Image: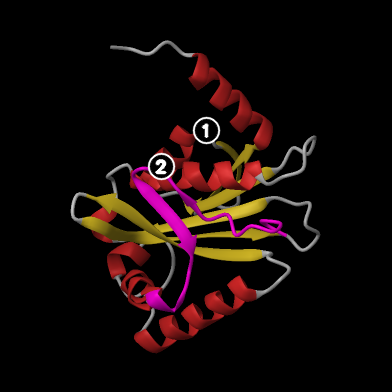
Amino acid sequence: MIAGPSDLSFETPRVKARLLCEDDLDLYLALYTDPEVMRYIGPVMGRGAAEAQFRKALALNLEEAGRVRYWAAYAAEDVGISPLGIMSAARSGTGLGPVEIGIMLLRRMQRRGRGRLLLTGLIDSIFGHERPGIDLVVMARHRSRNVAASELFSCIGFSTSAIEDSRMVVRTLTSQQWLRRASSLALAPVSS
C-alpha cells in the first residue's frame, strides 16, 4: 500500500496535490494530447485513448490496496488556483519494493520551480507514512535526453542508480538520504 489510511494528498503555501477526480479530465487530456509534453514520455494520445487511460487512473485511485495513486497538482496563484499537472506513485507487488514516482507538468508550467515543490511535497508524504526503521526507496525514470528531468531529480537529491539502456536513466532516493538532507538544510545558516 502506498499511503496506508491516507491518500498522500498535500498542500503547501504555493502548491497542492489531491487525488485525481472527474473534474481533472481536461487537465489530463491537455497533458497526454500535447506533443511537447509527451516528447520525452511516449506517443501523443488521441482524445479517446487519453480518456480511457484517465478512467483507468480513476479506478486505480479507488482500489483499496492503494498500490497506484494519481494526483492532480495545482499552484496557488494571485488570482486563485492554476492547474500544474499530474503526479503518480506506484509500489511493487510485494509492498516492500521501491515506490516509483512520476510527474507531468503542463507546458506553460515547466521550468518555473513548481515541479521541485510538488516532488518535495510528494516525497515528504511518502516517507512520512512509512513505518519507522524501514529505509524506503523512491525511484524515478526519465529519458536520458530529458535535461529538465535530470536537473529536477538531481536538485532534490536523487542519485543515478542505473542506466537501463542508452535511453533511460533510473534515479533513486532513500528515506535515510531524505532525512539527512532535510536535517542538513535545517541546520544550514540562513544567508541574507
Residue drawn 27% across the image and 59% down it: 82
CB contact under 8 Å: marks 2 and 1:
no
To which residue does mark 1 refer? 157
The 10 Å Cα crowd at callout 1, few under 14, some 14 to 19, many 20 or more, is some
Left/right placement of residue 128 relative to residue 87 reads right
Question: In the displayed structure, does residue 158 sit left or right of residue 93?
Answer: left
Q: What separation in Å lies between label 2 and label 1 (alpha carbons)? A: 11 Å
Quarter the N terminus occupies: bottom right
Counting residues from the start of the chain, the first of labels 2 and 1 encountered is: 2
Which label sits in the foreground, 2 or 1?
Answer: 2
Q: Which residues are magenta?
A: 1-23
Residue 166 visible in the shown view:
no
Q: Residue at (42%, 10%) from the top-left corner?
A: 189
Which residue lies under the disc numbered 2? Answer: 116
Q: Is residue 176 above or below residue 7?
A: above
Q: Does the rendering let one see residue 124?
A: yes
Determine the secondary structure under disc 1. Answer: loop
